């Protein structure tokens, strides 16, 4: 059977729709962070109990992608996106009306389940239509939104709290979800033609995931995504404690320091966008790994040499963020390049590696070390070494082929 080319969308439309879908995930993760102390008092619970709402959301977000991707391979990207974002809106409304911590848990789980469509489907939509440097360029734009949003959302949440209670934060999330639904309903086109769809059966799904996990061409880039984002979410969880508690910065000074993180990532993405048509994905990943090696070394040495310096912390952060800008779109495109027939499953599994890596990075940073400073100077160099080791093993494998 000859598979016809899907109607699809332009590169710009794909990037805008995919980027907005992806933005919903980190927005919902961090928008209500400034309200956590208030929620503790209103619901009569503990700090640990409210923090578990983040864990519930993160876990549902990561795991539901494994369902969302295969569903989109069977029913198409657009219809599955509409269904999952409707679930997300429902979860947001449950959270908004939550009278207790238990109901908030339920709402956050529903939210995380629904929003999983963002990462999985945006990558599948790109893979349906684009390969090579064009795919890297579009994924770079999507990746920019994915990583900048967590830096912006807490500030937005603080502004919203000035005008009302924490319930309004979830109303904003519901409104954002409704906007995504409207965009999918009116502005998006299906990118997967009917003749290219595959059955949604447990045997087929498990077979697809088995194929992906046994393919080094998929597994190695996915592991690099996992390690890269474990580092990012690790130091994101640690920086408030290192800079505010350790170095005595005020919240405003902390916000100014975090501009180094956001600015470095934006600069890195602009650089990747300019270089993606000249350099292949392999060279972009090589540059990224060099940057991560330099960043890991800087994390290990600069805070010890200059213990009272903010720049000793933020310079390694900035270098890491430029490295993420180089590696994320390249590794994603490389992981999905050979699996167009199961792009939904491939997009879901790369998202699982990425979100799961972030979860493990933040969990490790908060539990395995006696304090935030120690975690920063030990965990980050180890993650950098692991990423470089994975890449070197893969290079040796390719030479033997």
Image (tube, grey):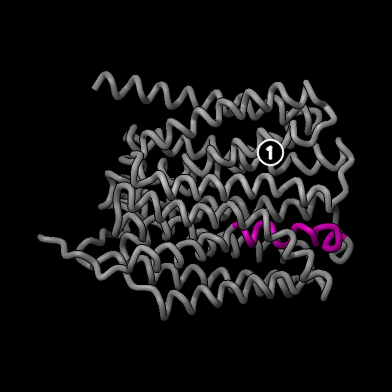
Total marks shown come to 1
**Residue at x 42%, y 60% (from the top left corner):** 121
**Mark 1 secondary-structure assignment:** helix
Q: Quadrant of the N terminus?
A: bottom left
**Residue at x 43%, y 46% (from the top left corner):** 329
Q: Is residue 3 above or below residue 297?
A: below
The stretch of residues the image draws in magenta is: 26-40
Q: Residues within 10 Å of mark 1 (few under 14, many from 20)?
A: many
* Left or right placement of residue 322 versus residue 3 in this view: right
Image quarter of residue 179: bottom right
> x and y percent of residue 57 in the render?
63, 56
**Residue at x 82%, y 75% (from the top left corner):** 163
Q: Is residue 246 above or below residue 46?
A: above
Q: Is residue 121 above or below residue 375?
A: below
* Left or right placement of residue 259 versus residue 118 in this view: right
Residue holding disc 1: 235
> x and y percent of residue 384 in the render?
57, 27
Question: Magenta residues: mostly which secondary structure?
Answer: helix
> x and y percent of residue 251 in the render?
84, 51
**Residue 114 colored magenta?**
no
* Left or right placement of residue 339 versus residue 251 in this view: left
**Residue 38 colored magenta?**
yes
**Residue at x 64%, y 39% (from the top left corner):** 318
> x and y percent of residue 362 in the render?
67, 40
Image quarter of residue 275: top left
């Amino acid at each position: 059977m000859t598979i016809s080319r899907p109607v699809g969308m332009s590169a710009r439309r794909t990037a805008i729709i995919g980027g907005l879908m992806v933005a919903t995930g980190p927005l919902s993760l961090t928008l209500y962070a400034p309200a956590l102390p208030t929620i503790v008092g209103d619901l009569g619970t503990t700090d640990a109990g409210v923090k578990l709402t983040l864990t519930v959301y993160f876990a549902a977000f990561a795991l539901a992608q494994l369902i969302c991707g295969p569903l989109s391979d069977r029913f198409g990207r657009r219809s599955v996106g509409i269904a999952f974002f409707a679930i997300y809106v429902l979860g947001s409304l449950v959270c908004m009306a939550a009278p207790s911590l238990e109901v908030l848990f339920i709402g956050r789980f529903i939210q995380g389940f629904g929003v999983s469509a963002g990462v999985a489907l945006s990558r599948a939509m790109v893979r349906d239509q684009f390969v090579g440097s064009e795919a890297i360029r579009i994924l770079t734009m999507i990746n920019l939104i994915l990583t900048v949003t967590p830096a912006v959302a807490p500030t937005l949440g603080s502004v919203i709290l000035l005008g009302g209670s924490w319930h309004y934060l979830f109303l904003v999330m519901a409104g954002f979800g409704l906007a995504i639904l409207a965009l999918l309903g009116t502005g998006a086109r299906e990118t997967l033609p009917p003749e290219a769809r595959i059955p949604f059966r447990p045997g087929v799904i498990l077979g697809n995931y088995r194929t992906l996990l046994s393919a080094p061409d998929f597994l190695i880039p996915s592991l690099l995504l996992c390690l890269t984002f474990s580092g990012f979410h690790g130091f994101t969880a640690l920086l408030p404690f290192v800079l505010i508690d350790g170095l005595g910065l005020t919240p405003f000074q902390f916000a100014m320091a975090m501009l180094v993180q956001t600015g470095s990532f934006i600069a890195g993405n602009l650089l990747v966008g300019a270089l993606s048509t000249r350099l292949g994905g392999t060279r972009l990943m090589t540059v990224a790994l060099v940057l991560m090696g330099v960043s890991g070394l800087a994390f290990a040495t600069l805070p010890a040499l200059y213990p009272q310096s903010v720049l000793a912390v933020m310079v390694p952060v900035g270098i890491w963020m430029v490295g993420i800008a180089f590696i994320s779109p390249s590794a994603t495109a490389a992981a999905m390049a050979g699996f167009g027939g199961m792009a939904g499953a491939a997009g879901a599994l790369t998202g699982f590696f990425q979100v799961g890596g972030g979860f493990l990075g933040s969990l490790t940073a908060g539990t395995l070390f006696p304090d935030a400073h120690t975690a920063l100077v030990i965990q980050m160099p180890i993650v950098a070494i692991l990423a470089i080791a994975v890449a070197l093993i893969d290079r040796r494998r390719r030479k033997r082929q």
